[in-house]
Amino acid sequence: MPRAEPGLTVASFNIHYAIGNDRRLDPLRIARTVAAFDADIVALQEVGWHYRGRAGLDQFDFLREQTGYEAHAGLTRSHARAHFGNALPARVSVGAVRPLDLSVRLCALRGAIDADVEIAGRMVRVINVHLGLDPWERCIQAGRLLDAIQPRPKGPLVLLGDFNDWRAKSAGIRELRAVLPHCLSPRSYPSRRPLLRFDRVYASAELVIGEGGVFEPSTTRLASDHFPVVARIGFAG
């Protein structure tokens, strides 16, 4: 993908615990895919292990070692039987990193990573999110995201990740779009035959989303049940 300056190249990828469509656990394949994005910052979901993956393998450290990115972790579980969550690998300067708890009672644990990123001398807030499977759950989580976004001073903001919602006008999504008017939502799931727009990039009015879409070399189709989404973000005006 050609790079224009100044700006930020972002990517989102649900790696399915590094288990591919061929049912192989292959963290190295994931690391090589992440490196191929040539992105400044990457939002990863389903990193680590619990009932999937290899117990004891720290995928966060593995990604750091294999990609050279600093992989900021947002764990939703970390104990003897599980170590998993989201990750935010970055090769640009990252300031404050804030975990957000999006878990809803009686549902699977969910979370987000909220980070301040410096690019071309300007600060951009980047949030990596993984929402739940039920519509009512996602509506609650969208409200929590809005609560986290709105009290802070306004400024450039990118929200990206796996939204688990194919409906562009669902209640929670409509509320987020009121704050984040720009959106890239290609068909990314399932990677064997992508039909649903689960993986998205949203941006605030201070930013523009340039070229982008699914990252689709032949090896990526096997790497996970989701395709990665890559986008070029620039500053408006």
Image (cartoon, grey):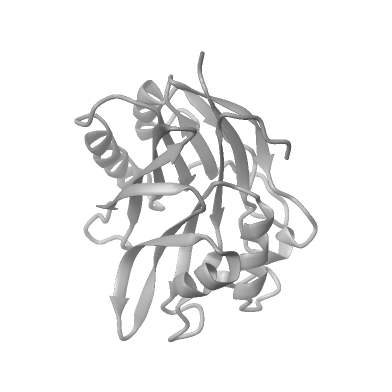
Whole-percent x, y for residue 141 in the image = 30, 44
Q: Quadrant of residue 146?
A: top left
Whole-percent x, y for residue 77 in the image = 31, 71
Whole-percent x, y for residue 152 in the image = 22, 31
In this picture, residue 102 sits left or right of residue 7: left
Question: Could you tell me how many numbered marks the image carries?
Answer: 0
In the image, is residue 21 above or below residue 134?
below
In the image, is residue 142 above or below residue 63?
above
Camera-side residue of 90 and 222: 90
The residue sitting at the front extreme is: 121
Camera-side residue of 52 and 98: 98
Whole-percent x, y for residue 80 in the image = 31, 86
The residue at the point 52 percent across, 29 percent down is: 183
In the image, is residue 145 above or below residue 37?
above
In this picture, residue 15 sits left or right of residue 72: right
In this picture, residue 197 sits left or right of residue 161: right
Q: Quadrant of the N terminus?
A: top right
The residue at the point 63 percent across, 47 percent down is: 188
Camera-side residue of 141 and 44: 44
The residue at the point 51 percent across, 13 percent down is: 237
Camera-side residue of 232 and 104: 232
The residue sitting at the right extreme is: 218
